[in-house]
Amino acid sequence: QEDLVESGGGLVQAGGSLRVSCVATQSIFSFNSMGWYRQAPGNERELVATLFRGDGTHYADSVKGRFTISRDIAKNTLYLQMNSLKPEDTAVYYCNAKKRNWSGNDIDYWGQGTQVTVSS
């Protein structure tokens, strides 16, 4: 059973919008933070946005003002609303969740990824 399951990817024209979702199999409050990463072909996986348990957020400079991360606690779901999409946003988007173990180290959970393709 997957811990995190993404959905909502697809093909969209430049300037368009898309929302990807990530459903967790456990309460999202059990995680210290949840976030979205992306990986384009030939590139390293990069952090896109993070939502901390206390509602703080962090965005990569490349998506600030265009992307919004949010959650629905009742549905154990994390979202990434992507507006004003650009071809360079094309990538596989991965949901990530972090827990801190007893020794103070982060344990990472990953989804399987969802493809987002932005055509020019």
Image: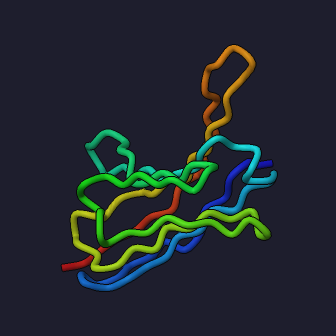
Residue at 76% x, 44% y is 30
Query: How many tags in the picture?
Result: 0
Residue 44 spot, x, y in % from top left: 31, 39
Task: Decide if residue 40 is on the left or right side of residue 49.
Answer: left
Residue 58 placed where, x, y %? 41, 52
Left or right position of 83 against 57: left
Classify residue 51 as left or right of residue 75.
left
Q: Is residue 97 above or below residue 49?
A: above
Residue 36 drawn at (x, y percent): 48, 54
The quarter of the displayed image where residue 62 is located = bottom left
At x 61%, y 20%, the residue is: 105
Q: Measuring 29% from the left and 62% from the top, which residue is drawn there?
A: 63
Q: Is residue 23 above or below residue 4?
A: below
Q: Which quadrant holds residue 67?
A: bottom left
What x and y, as percent, mark residue 7?
59, 69
Q: Image quadrant for the C terminus?
A: bottom left
The vertical placement of 111 against 98, above or below, is below
Where residue 15 sits, quadrant-wise, is: bottom left
Q: How is the image coloured?
A: rainbow
- The residue sitting at 25% across, 54% down in the picture is 61
